[in-house]
Amino acid sequence: MNRSQSQKVLGYYSQKFRDKTSRFSDEINEGTMLHSKTVPFEHTADIDNRMKNHQFYFGIPWPNNIESNVTSDENGYLYSCFINDRIKSYWVPKLHEELLKNPIFLS
């Protein structure tokens, strides 16, 4: 709970430590990274076979976000994740809008 919620519910607020580096995000104008991984270069060798034989770093989303008995796509890559519809329908278009404002993409 934040300060005002704590005071309202408990009648007091006690901050155990001061974290000056953290802040709450503005969810209207800012995005939050949901998923990020570092993939060591050596793990990308023979990527085609790796992604076809076991779930891998790189996500291949389940069709329609529904798990089924069909475990791979038409190319043989194993399904390993789901698409977050809020990210896809709300944040990705905002990202594209902002990228198009960058001079690199205008030429």
Image (cartoon, rainbow, N blue to C red):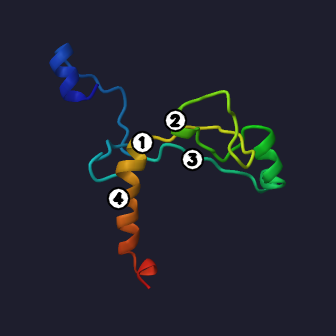
Q: Nearer the viewer, residue 46 or 65?
A: 65
Residue type at mark 1: give it. Answer: Asp
* Circle 2 or circle 1, nearest the eye: 2
Residue name at image x 35 percent, y 66 percent = 97
Residue name at image x 39 percent, y 60 percent = 95
* Circle 4 or circle 2, nearest the eye: 2
- Mark-to-mark CA distance, 4 and 3: 19 Å
Instruction: From the top left corner, tell me how far across and down residue 35 is, in percent.
Output: 53, 44
Question: Compared with residue 101, is residue 8 higher up or lower down, i.e. above or below?
Answer: above
Dot 1 or dot 4: first in sequence order is 1
* Circle 3 or circle 1, nearest the eye: 1
Residue name at image x 26 percent, y 49 percent = 28
Instruction: From the top left corner, tell me how far across and down residue 27 is, in percent.
Output: 30, 45
**Circles 2 and 1: CB distance less than 8 Å?**
yes
In the rendered image, which quarter contains the C terminus?
A: bottom left
Q: Nearer the viewer, residue 24 or 57?
A: 57
Secondary structure of residue under mark 2: helix
The residue singled out by tag 4 in the image is: 94
The reply to whether residue 13 is in sight is yes
The residue singled out by tag 2 in the image is: 65
Q: Which mark is residue 34?
A: none
Secondary structure of residue under mark 4: helix
Dot 2 or dot 3: first in sequence order is 3
* Circle 1 or circle 4, nearest the eye: 1
